[in-house]
Amino acid sequence: MPEQLVFAMEVFLNGLMAGVLYALVALGFVLIYKASGIFNYAQGVMALFSALTLVGIMEGQVPFAHLINAIFGTEIHHFGWHVPALLAILFTMAVMVGLAWVVNKLIFRHLVNQEPIILFMATIGLAYFLEGFGDIMWGADIKKLDVGLPQGINTWIDESTFNIFDYGFFIDNLDIVATVVAALLVTALVIFAQYTKQGRAMRAVADDHQAALSVGISLNFIWVMVWSVAGFVALVAGIMWGTKSGVQFSLSLIALKALPVLMLGGFTSIPGAIVGGLIIGVGEKLFEFAIGPLVGGATENWFAYVLALIFLVFRPQGLFGEKIIERV
Amino acid sequence: MFYREAGDFKTSYTEDNQTFPIKFDRYRYYAVLLVAFAVVPFIINDYWVNAVFLPFLIYAIAAIGLNILVGYCGQVSLGTGGFMAVGAYACYKLMTGFPEINIFFHIILSGGITAAVCVAFGLPSLRIKGFYLAVATLAAQFFLVWLFNKVSWFYNYSASGQINAPERTVFGVPVTGAEAAPWAAYLFCLVFTFISAIIARNTTRGMAGRKWMAIRDMDIAAEIIGVNPLKAKLSAFAVSGFFVGIAGALFFSVYLGAVEVGEVFGITKSFLVLFMIIIGGLGSIFGSFAGAAFLVLLPVLLKNLLVGTLGWPTDLAAHLEFMIVGALIVVFLVAEPHGLAQLWRVAKEKLRLWPFPH
């Protein structure tokens, strides 16, 4: 088999794995958009915030230590204990639920019936706030996140591909874990949405707010729930990305990576988010591999957007989005 | 009494349709202009120009441009940073390519070039709407910044990848480069801001502006009553791009002098200008000014207060600034979705009736 083709196959596989991670972030967007019509730009920052909180709890950091030190001239940093990963994840989840409640209570309850663009702006404001808040609460330095996920090259794939192609593929164990987790997460979400009472209520709200309200579904409860679920998805994404590249500010930029995925897959479709993520992941890696060297590299920044843009011109609602019907 | 229409009789349509129909308002406007043109240049120093006045004037132009697209025509754009970069690089290429021509024309030409680029990226808006369009404009943002980073022709093959504004003069007075006096730079920008505001105000209340607003309110209905959506949307992109390009050119040549594209014209710039028009008020020229002033002054104020007065570390102040800006945006949206301009309108209404409640 020609060498280039083998390389391309490795790139393809890595692209698939990257695509799964994009899809993870995109999932959070889709959930909130479907249930409340809010295009939640803060999803990426929520991932960052949850990862920061997780690290903070695990390391036993004192929240707002920097602020307290600056005001009172004290020198406190850590409580001095370490919380096991699983317990810390539970605590973080509680924080995310609390955040969902506060966000709903303070912001989105007051913005009911506003135009979608106003809601979108509000989430950008929320993103800015959370970014500053997370940094003040836990400090802005780059942190290592280790919840015990396997990392490093997968030797089994390396060896078996070496036997076949004379060239070992480099696949990170973490990416494989992420793929499995994403698959589990999507299955769980689908089961939740299809077969549980709350899930059905959520879909009813997504379909028609007023009709759902009139059959006795509490909008507030559903919205808090949806934001909590989105917070949970953000936490999972935060753990994966945080383990991969450290918990730092750039984590919030994965929201920007998820946007073209959403466009491609359609804002309203969970399968769309997955398929879109895979297409974008594979597309940008292969493009960088094949065309990147000719034009100076770093094409990953814009390729996804341009691909989605070209795609949308032919299919404005995305791959799986609901058909846009306009009435006067 | 002040601020009353009473006794102010209009005898022609021109008078009736003027921007400031109330006499008091009109004189206030002239007074502001007089102070801006004839008083401020004599009393400002380097710090005030660089920290407050130049960013305010330049952002005001950018905000007017974006407001035309978002506030008047309803096409949400997140590519402002990229389009400002087009203006800046066009200006740089023109300045270095044709040094004998006055910089005034360079800046207007770079506005024109940006308008053309903006129209090209606006073409998908005919098919894509709402959020899809907002995300699609991000393609422009990322692609343009990448382009200016990678193609060395744009920065004249300089080793650092930066562009530096050479010294240029207007009437023999340097306005760009290291030798430029604060007042000269200020006046140069002020002229552009003033003219931009007048053009924008009169375009938006003329036929073009009414077409944009029809498209914004409901594009299908607008199409049915005979507004050509192709022309209306693309003209909004063009006019918006023109102003944003001028702002980018001024930002580079007069304000910063040296630019590294990824840092200066990144996605944060797009959001900043968007915040300006949201806080100031969508669909209002005054709102563009108010929003620009607000978001330029807020960081300066916070920095002086927290770092200067309370002695906090700068990184803490920076994070707090993020929080406050974010919270303010949310508070504004909850309390007054139409921004500062609406508060101003309400205040004026109250003032006209004062001291009577109704």
Image: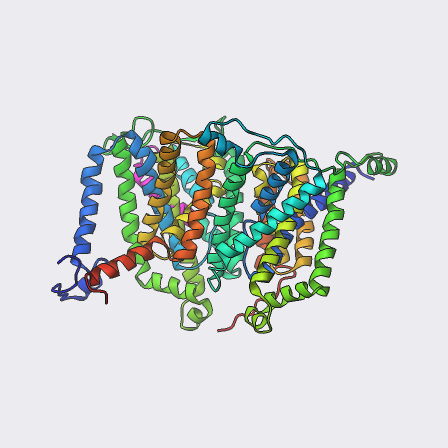
Q: Is residue A303 left or right of residue B162?
A: right
Q: Quadrant of the N terminus of chain B?
A: bottom left
Q: Is residue B296 above or below residue A215?
A: above
Q: Is residue B284 above or below residue B46?
A: below
* Image mark count: 0
Q: A210 or A15, which lies in front?
A: A210
Q: Where in the figure is residue B209, as x and y percent of width and height?
A: 34, 61
Quarter of the image for residue A89 reads top right
Q: B311 or B226, which lies in front?
A: B311
Q: Where in the figure is residue A134, as x and y percent of width and height?
A: 54, 40
For the question of whether residue A13 can be seen, the reply is no
The secondary structure making up most of the magenta span is helix
Q: Is residue B22 left or right of residue A189?
A: left
Q: B108 or B55, which lies in front?
A: B55
Q: Is residue B233 above or below residue A2?
A: below
Read off the magenta span.
B98-115
Magenta stretch encompasses residue A142: no
For the question of whether residue B267 can be seen, the reply is yes
Q: B270 or B147, which lies in front?
A: B270
Q: Residue at x 42, y 69 (%)?
A: B222
Quarter of the image for residue A238 reads top right
Q: Is residue B95 left or right of residue A119?
A: left
Q: Where in the figure is residue A57, as x and y percent of width and height?
A: 63, 38
